[in-house]
Amino acid sequence: MKRILTAIFLLAVFDGFSQIGGASTYQFLNLVSSPRQAALGGKVLTNVDYDVTQALTNPAAINWDMGNQLAVNYSSYLGGINYGTLAYAYNLDRHSQTVHIGATYINYGNFDGYDENGVSTGTFTGNEAALSLGYARQIGYSDFYAGGNLKMITSKLEQYNSLGIAFDVGVMYINTDLEFNATLVVRNAGTQITTYSGTNESLPFEVALGLSQTLENVPLRWHLTFDNLHVWPIGSPNPARITTDLEGNQTQEEVGFFNNVLRHMILGAELFPNKGFNLRFGYNFRRAEELRIEEQRNFSGLAFGVGIKIKKLRFSYTHSRFSGASNPNFFGLQIDLQ
């Protein structure tokens, strides 16, 4: 199994380095998978507990506590876009054999169509979906766990259709004494089976690293995620931030080394992570920097949310700050079917 995981990992890494950033299809695969994820900055890889939706982001997190948990999440996203996720896990036996099923769906709403002469061609819509099957297991008797997701993807944009296949691979280290987790995840390595119009496009490949730990004397778990590690530099100068001096000379924005490092970072904290009531906070440096407006405070990059458990139900809500124009809300419900 170790040889198989190593081969898959190397194949995924080589596939990722062959791509050009920003030129990929099926971008919905990288949307936030749950309100809890959104509240902790948009991407957390190291939660190993009841949260069955976590496996959509990192299959190595699939564990026994997810068994018979059903989660449904929804967001009315930006510009009238609606999307949601669904996740369920089932324990096969008493030896911690757990399988995971997940789904992501997005609908882009209705659009007015026009031909090259400006004549109306009616309305059209667009939607995409992905169905995943995941599995994870302990590597020998070590503190390391490995998991994988296989995803089938379908996309319909106006009259164009596409099918794709992708997989995620994750390896996680879990230290129960220190309550510390670390993980490396390769996501969305794959290809289109059928293209929209004869041109094969790459998938939104990603390599990410996650760390988290519960503090010893404080009921708080911190999370640190480094995403898009295969892309450097990740930041580009913003044309809207060009400055002009009194002599008319223009200076382009500089994105230095330290700024590029920060744009890979996501911070999150969850207060009372193991209780029936949770408070969650997150900060996404890249979102904050890229959506920042000069001389205006809009708190881009911040997110906060709550989780409430009532018997066998868990409710989650998150508000994320994007810009002054629109800020999405996320809603989630998880049901214990045992």
Image (cartoon, rainbow, N blue to C red):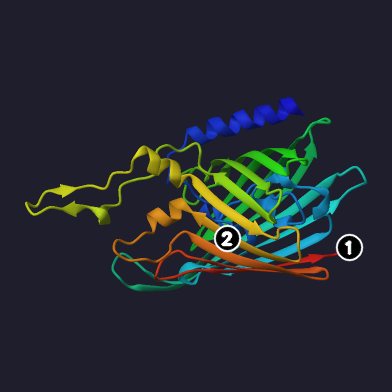
Q: Is residue 25 left or right of residue 73?
A: left
**Local crowd size for mark 1, using a 10 Å CA cut-off: few (<14), some (14–19), many (≥20):** few
In which image quadrant can residue 324 be found? bottom left
Q: Residue at horizontal 90%, vertical 42%?
A: 95
Question: Residue beneath label 1, please?
Answer: 338
Above or below, 74 against 51 in this view is: below
In which image quadrant can residue 288 be found? bottom left
Task: Name the residue furthest left.
Answer: 247
Q: In front of the other: label 1 or label 2?
A: 2
The residue type indicated by label 1 comes to Gln
Residue 332 in percent (x, y) is at 67, 67
Residue 297 in percent (x, y) is at 36, 66
User: Of label 1 and label 2, which has the lower sequence position?
Assistant: 2
Residue 48 in percent (x, y) is at 73, 49
The residue type indicated by label 2 comes to Phe
Q: Is residue 285 left or right of residue 106?
A: left
Task: Name the residue furthest right.
Answer: 94
Q: Is residue 2 left or right of residue 206?
A: right
Q: Return the mark for residue 281.
A: 2
Q: Residue at horizontal 53%, vertical 62%?
A: 303
- Asked if residue 17 can be seen in this view, the reply is yes
